[in-house]
Image (cartoon, rainbow, N blue to C red):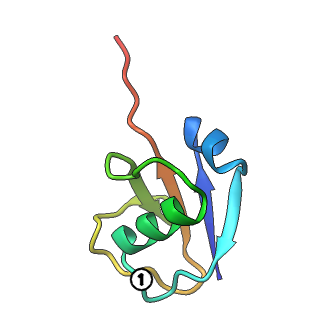
Amino acid sequence: MNKILFFAHLRDEAGEESISLDAEGKTVEELKQMVAEQYQMKRLDSVMTAINEEFAPGDEVIKAGDVIAFIPPVSGG
């Protein structure tokens, strides 16, 4: 199992701060698509992803026990 964390407005969209899913063997992009469909979220294309607190590219494969965080873009000035 994997823990998926949602930050900022993604937490509101998902209705949860975190969820547990079996994402082992999936790429980050596959997980984004699965979560977006399952939780009726907007596309997660622009969302940064971290695996075990390290930013991860879309083609990185998730391992059992990894903690995945979805972090939306932030603007400031």
Q: Position of residue 5 (x, y in %)?
A: 61, 56
Q: Position of residue 34 (x, y in %)?
A: 48, 70
The answer to whether residue 18 is left or right of residue 65 is right
Q: Residue at x 51, y 64 (%)?
A: 37
The answer to whether residue 38 is left or right of residue 51 is right
Q: Position of residue 59 (x, y in %)?
A: 27, 74
Q: Secondary structure at mark 1?
A: loop
Which of the 4 image quarters holds residue 10?
top right
Q: Residue furthest right?
A: 16
Looking at the image, how many numbered discs can be counted on the residues? Answer: 1
Q: Residue furthest top?
A: 77
Q: Residue at x 56, y 55 (%)?
A: 40
User: As rendered, which of 13 and 7 lies closer to the eye?
Assistant: 13
The answer to whether residue 21 is left or right of residue 51 is right
Q: Position of residue 25 (x, y in %)?
A: 43, 89
**Residue 67 visible to an observer of this rendering:** yes
Image height of 58 relative to 13, above or below: below
Q: Give the residue type at disc 1.
A: Lys
**Residue 8 visible to an observer of this rendering:** no
Q: Residue at x 72, y 51 (%)?
A: 16
User: As rendered, which of 19 and 68 lies closer to the eye?
Assistant: 19
Q: Residue at x 41, y 60 (%)?
A: 54
Quarter in which the C terminus is drawn: top left
Q: Which residue is mark 1?
A: 26
Q: Residues within 10 Å of mark 1 (few under 14, many from 20)?
A: some
The answer to whether residue 36 is left or right of residue 5 is left
Quarter in which the N terminus is drawn: bottom right
